[in-house]
Amino acid sequence: MKILYYDKELIGENRTLIAISNYLKGNIDLELLLNAYKIITAEKEIANQKEYLPYSKDWLKMGELN
């Protein structure tokens, strides 16, 4: 199975394939694989939601504490 040797760039959803590859190799257990998948999908959802914020980045920075 080619996924055992997945070695492309570790960004975005590619990280899911890396986690599956490591699970199949026995480097991580099922719990860690599921946690990684949950984190990766949550990060994707956050990124998707940020695209549709009705406010500019400058406006959001105005509320930050220094």
Image: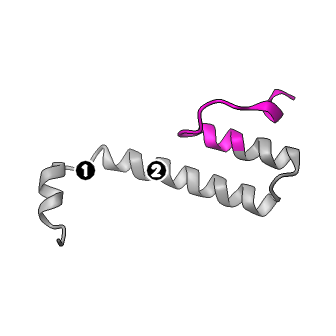
Q: Name the residue that disc number 1 marks.
A: 53
Distance of label 1 from label 2 (alpha carbons): 13 Å
Magenta range is 1-18
Q: Residue at x 28, y 45 (%)?
A: 52
- Looking at the rendered structure, the secondary structure element under dot 1 is loop
Indicate whether residue 37 is drawn in magenta. Answer: no
Indicate whether residue 10 is drawn in magenta. Answer: yes
The quadrant the C terminus occupies is: bottom left
The correct choice, above or below, for 5 with respect to 31 in the image is: above
Is 59 on the left-hand or right-hand side of 33?
Answer: left
Q: Residue at x 56, y 50 (%)?
A: 41
Residue 19 at x, y percent in the picture: 72, 47
Q: Earlier in the sequence, mark 1 or mark 2?
A: 2
Q: Name the residue that disc number 2 marks.
A: 45
The quadrant the N terminus occupies is: top right
Is 17 on the left-hand or right-hand side of 58?
Answer: right
